[in-house]
Image: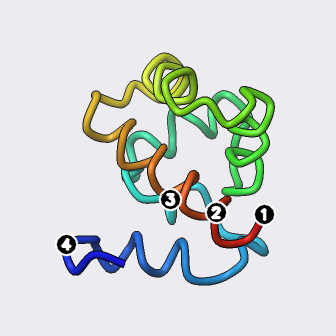
């Protein structure tokens, strides 16, 4: 793993999701997490479900995050990269 990854990224991708809150996903701070919670997404595993529903297509997932959380491109990419890395590690 690159030394340029954040601690939040390493924590997220280094262990199973269990009951992690949405704000623990890299790229999602309190404001974006609140936006997703208002759309019914409260846990990281629910966000993983969206990614899997989109057939692990990072481009579509990034668009979904931007549309549903109000993320910018950088935040959406951070989130997408973390979810994808999690899948590579655990699925």
Packing grade of label 4 (10 A; few <14, some 14-19, many >=20) is: few
In the image, farthest residue toward the left = 4
> What residue appears at the point 37 percent right and 78 percent down from the top-left corner?
1
User: Helix, strand, or loop for circle 1?
Assistant: loop
Residue 12 image offset from top left, x and y in percent: 53, 72
Q: Which residue is mark 2?
A: 88
User: Helix, strand, or loop for circle 2?
Assistant: helix
Q: Which residue is mark 3?
A: 25
User: Helix, strand, or loop for circle 3?
Assistant: loop
User: Is 67 rendered above or below residue 8?
Assistant: above
Query: Image check: 11 left or right of 18?
Result: left
Packing grade of label 2 (10 A; few <14, some 14-19, many >=20) is: few
Residue situated in front as seen by the camera: 12 or 34:
12
Q: Nearer the viewer, mark 2 or mark 3?
A: 2
Contact between labelled residues 2 and 4, with CB atoms less than 8 Å apart: no
**Which mark sits nearer the N-terminus, 1 or 4?**
4
Q: Which residue is mark 1?
A: 91
Q: Which residue is mark 4?
A: 4
Per the model, the C-alpha gap separating discs 1 and 3 is 17 Å
């Amino acid at each position: 793993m690159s030394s340029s990854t954040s601690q939040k990224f390493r924590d997220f991708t280094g262990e199973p999701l269990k009951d992690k809150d949405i704000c623990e996903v890299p790229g999602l701070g309190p404001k974006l997490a609140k936006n997703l919670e208002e759309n019914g997404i409260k846990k990281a595993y629910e966000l993983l479900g969206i990614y899997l529903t989109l057939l692990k297509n990072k481009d579509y997932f990034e668009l979904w995050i931007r549309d549903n959380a109000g993320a910018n491109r950088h935040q959406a990419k951070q989130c997408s990269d973390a979810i994808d890395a999690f899948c590579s590690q655990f699925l």
